[in-house]
Image (cartoon, grey):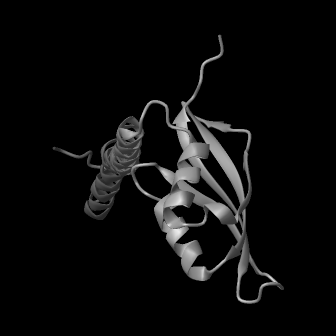
Amino acid sequence: MRWPARIALREHWYLRGALAVVALLAAIQFFYLPWREARTTLTQGIATQERTLHDLLLQVASYEKLKNREDDFQRRLALRPKDFSIFSYVEKQAGDSGVRGNIRSMTVGRGTTVGGYEEIPLDIRLEKLTLKQLTQFIALLESPEAFLQVKKLAISRMKEPAGYLAVGMQVATYQPRRTSP
């Protein structure tokens, strides 16, 4: 490239340097910065998608765990007799453990609905029990076949006869929700 004669050699190099700087700045502005911004956006998008995938996998694992628990729940309920009654079951277990004569009262409470099932509570009051009798009775009550559990338990010492306990407990079980006609 031939430069006009009016420009000195030193100015000629300054001009070339300035053009190189302008070209470099233009390359940075129009090529490098957009590429870097797109790369940053892509990296952030990938990180966001990875977090979303991780959360989704946790949700799937939680769902599978809950589904397995529900399947186990339904299987255990299906093993019970169709005419299962919490009242008669507790009465039978009290007879088997030898505390039937110590029952002062049993009251079936109002059931609460949980999903497709109804929780049926039973309040039991017992008197003149020993600790051994109580533990045997509770062990018989909480069998996996009956799917029954002790929800509340209140124990107090009796004044007379000494050495005996008065017990108030609430046991509960689940059954499929009854549909209204």
Residue 3 picture location, percent across and down = 23, 46
Work out whether 165 lies above or below 98: below
Q: Residue furthest toward the left?
A: 1
Q: Is residue 151 left or right of residue 71?
A: right
Q: Residue 7, can we see it?
A: no
24 and 175: which one is in front?
A: 175
66 and 153: which one is in front?
A: 153
Q: Residue 93, can we see it?
A: yes
Q: Residue furthest toward the top?
A: 181
Quarter of the view holding residue 95: bottom right
Residue 174 picture location, percent across and down = 54, 41
Number of numbered markers: 0
155 and 137: which one is in front?
A: 137
Q: In which quadrant is the C terminus drawn?
A: top right
In percent of the image, x 63 and y 80: which residue is there? 130
Residue 15 picture location, percent across and down = 32, 54
Q: Residue furthest toward the bottom?
A: 162
Quarter of the view holding residue 166: bottom right
Work out whether 23 lies above or below 160: above
Q: Is residue 2 left or right of residue 101?
A: left
Residue 41 picture location, percent across and down = 39, 45
In percent of the image, x 57 and y 28: which residue is there? 177
In percent of the image, x 17 and y 44: which residue is there? 2
Q: In which quadrant is the N terminus drawn?
A: top left
Q: Residue furthest toward the right?
A: 159
Q: Is residue 172 left or right of residue 60?
A: right
Quarter of the view holding residue 135: bottom right
